[in-house]
Image (tube, coloured by chain):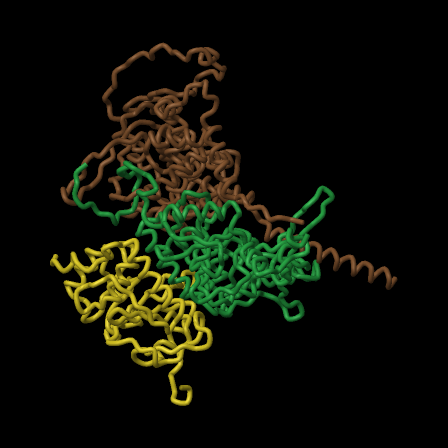
Amino acid sequence: MPTGRLRNDLPLVFAYFWNNEGAGMSEYNFAYLDEQTKRMIRRAILKGLAIPGYQVPFASREMPMPYGWGTGGVQVSAAVMTQADVLKVIDQGADDTTNAVSIRRFFERTAGVATTEATEAATVIQTRHRIPEVPLSEDQILVYQVPIPEPLRFLEPSEVETRKMHALEDYGLMHVKLYEDISAHGAIATSYAYPVQVEGRYVMDPSPIPKFDNPKLGMAAIQLFGAGREQRIYALPPYTQVVSLDFEDHPFEPSKADHPCGLCGATDSYLDELIVDDAGGRMFMCSDTDYCQARRAAGHVGALAEDAA
Amino acid sequence: MQQASLAGGFADPPHQSSTAFRAIMQVMARPGRIETITGGAAPAPLSGAASSVLLTLADPDTGVHLAGAFDTQAVRDWITFQTGAPLVAAPAAQFVLGAWADIDLTQLAIGTAEYPDRSATVIVELPALSPEGAILTGPGIRDRATLGLPGDVGVFQRNAALFPLGVDFMFTSGAQIAALPRSTKVSQCTSNQR
Amino acid sequence: MYVAVKGGEKAIDAAHAWLAEERRGPTDVAELSVAQIKGQLKLAVNRVMAEGSLYDPDLAALAIKQARGDLIEAVFLIRAYRTTLPRFGGSVPVDTGEMACDRRVSATFKDAPGGQVLGPTFDYTHRLLDFKLAADGEVPDAPEGTSDGVTKPHIMSFLDREDLVQKEPEGPEVPPDLTRAPLELPATRALRLQSLTRGDEGFILGMAYSTQRGYARNHAFVAELRIGTCAVEMEIPELGFAIEIGEVEVTECETVNQFQGSKTEPPQFTRGYGLVFGMSERKAISMALVDRALRWEELGEDNLGAPAQDEEFVLYHADNIQATGFLEHIKLPHYVDFQSELELIRKLRRDAEARDAHREAAE
């Protein structure tokens, strides 16, 4: 093959050819993605910030981890990350869940960034299904992994149709669904991925966080949402007005298990439920492991903690 | 192509572009905030900040339009060589760059109802950025922010009224950058509000 | 008393070590080489190349070995590698009319210039397990022929000449690229074909079969199925002309379909098209049928509401890497959302019981 500068602006036609020598991790670019991909994602992030709650289509890349396992969040994190960042990755609120470990390792290998489990020490936090308990600061960025970014998807399976609904600000279907819940169950039967309306315009899926976390969405940090398989990025700038959908006679209620944490005694944190014996005995503990750890380090003791015995 | 085109790019693209992008993201997410952004140095009259924005965001997939005095052969060559971005007419541009007086907003893409993101980002080169000026409220702003804006605030008010359509602004001067997305509500600063 | 368990990192390391051992299998059996997979499991290699959208038999064979024979996992490995590759440019469209055919059959004409070439097909094998293969696998040499050296024009070109087949509109100079831009609907035919050629073979087969059984039936004749190698050429701007940079094996299927004419079109034949990397004829035929079913709108046919006519349904669900990732992600922890559901169900149950108690007390 002749050498010389070839055009790099032609899209793939059918076949293409490459130099496949050497594919060790050191051969990959900073934070894995090539620069052109990062530019494309960065442009999508900026449009997302300019139009809060609107889902920006982006050409999601195939990542070395499965779709549905955080590919959108990973691409967004890779696009915003600098060498100076300190990364925290949580899944279900915990740093030690296997997929959080896997993603943290990925960035340790491909970006060489420092990592932490301490929420306050992190500059970029990638999360699946939770918002940390400690309020985030202006200097932090929270990146969500999103499975289905379209809040209307389970009411209308067609993307063509839901895009029209957003364009026309036609959210009647969503209100009907919530209202039907109330007439059938006496309450809105949505407990996670609870839909919100952003700045009075776009209805947005906050990702499958428990509705307990919804009130935290109007935070000081930048929030970025990445859905890799569905090829969408959306964003909430700091202090954006985010309202959980409800009705005057059935106001939105964030809820959690009505127990204190068994380990640290916290009554204000979201709890995991554990089955602890063959008789089906239960205990509750903070889902945010860093929050729980920090409280215990500060001397708080729950009823079931080792130290309490 | 002049030698000038070969200089003024990022020496270390992965790291310089990531740092530059963080500055751009911060100003777009926090209207009114002024950040420093460095690394790019296109031929005059482009500022270092505007050069860095193009190096960070423009590529063969994005049309760039140069308005007025910024449309010089040297600038064109630099953009082509450094980013590969095609130089296009204003309506087709994803990035429009120029002095305030030379930019005709009515020509620019404002997105569609279904795809409001398909809209231009306008990079306005200013003599200086000032934290004093119009009052800004909206997403990214806790209570209110202020920023010196060129021209009449009515232009920015009309753009915001198009929401979710509209264009998004970046203001550059020297190594400084600020931004004003379409979501920001702008009002004139009056003495009693100060 | 409860001590929170931490062990994610260790568990992952141990799982990976175990996986590596399982992949190797019993060490008293010789290790499978990549060359063996490439040479002897060629159809698996072809499928991985087709759905991985990367023409490299060596890498596909390596992926199959690493994936322990799980072809979707192998496709995934190839896709993840592929995204990291720099792009030097696009090739000139491959001219399948110039294909050196190993196989070429037509179901519409008994004979045609270039003739029918059966090639290495399973078609007329009796599906009887060959226990000799379990013993040694030695096979007698196949009889050698010589290449007829005859170019084999597309069968469809003869119908074209009679003006009996719908004219295909010119595509764009540079086709869109499914892997570089988000899929937008309605999709162009070029995008649909890209999606189908890399789509899951089983899914495309099922969709194609559904059209045969009556869900948007449009009886397809295989005008031609051809398998062979084609030269790949690339324009080199510095040279000002195209040079051959290699060759690829592809399978091409053109179907000719009945068409009665519509409000806008005269009675004529129409076409479905399949083109797939490697020897992948089940996939190529399936692709042609689904392509044809998806063309209902441009041909002015009725939307019968059949799954294979629904572009959004087909294109959004054809990709097995997307599908398997999302399907399998439900085994990840969902403690948080499940907990919220648990609380909700308990609350709704309490509320309902309280209402019942209230009603009973009132009665």
Note whether residue A55 is visible: no
Tell me where residue C2 appears, x and y as whole percent. 65, 49
Above/below status of C73 relative to B89 = above
Going 36% across and 57% down the picture, which residue do you hit? Answer: A84
Going 62% across and 57% down the picture, which residue do you hit? Answer: A264
Tell me where residue B65 appears, x and y as whole percent. 24, 64
Q: Colour of chain C?
A: brown
Above/below status of C309 relative to C119 = below
Q: Colour of chain B?
A: yellow
Q: Nearer the viewer, residue A64 or C272?
A: A64
Q: Nearer the viewer, residue A96 or B135?
A: A96
Q: Nearer the viewer, residue C134 or A154?
A: C134
Above/below status of B124 relative to C20 = below
Going 28% across and 24% down the picture, which residue do you hit? Answer: C113
Q: Which chain is green?
A: A
Q: Could you tell whether C336 is left or right of A10 in the image?
A: right
Tell me where residue A69 appears, x and y as whole percent. 48, 46
Tell me where residue C150 appears, x and y as whole percent. 24, 23
For this orientation, the residue located farthest to the right is C363
Going 19% across and 36% down the picture, which residue do you hit? Answer: A1
Q: Quadrant of the C terminus of chain C?
A: bottom right
Note whether residue C106 is visible: yes
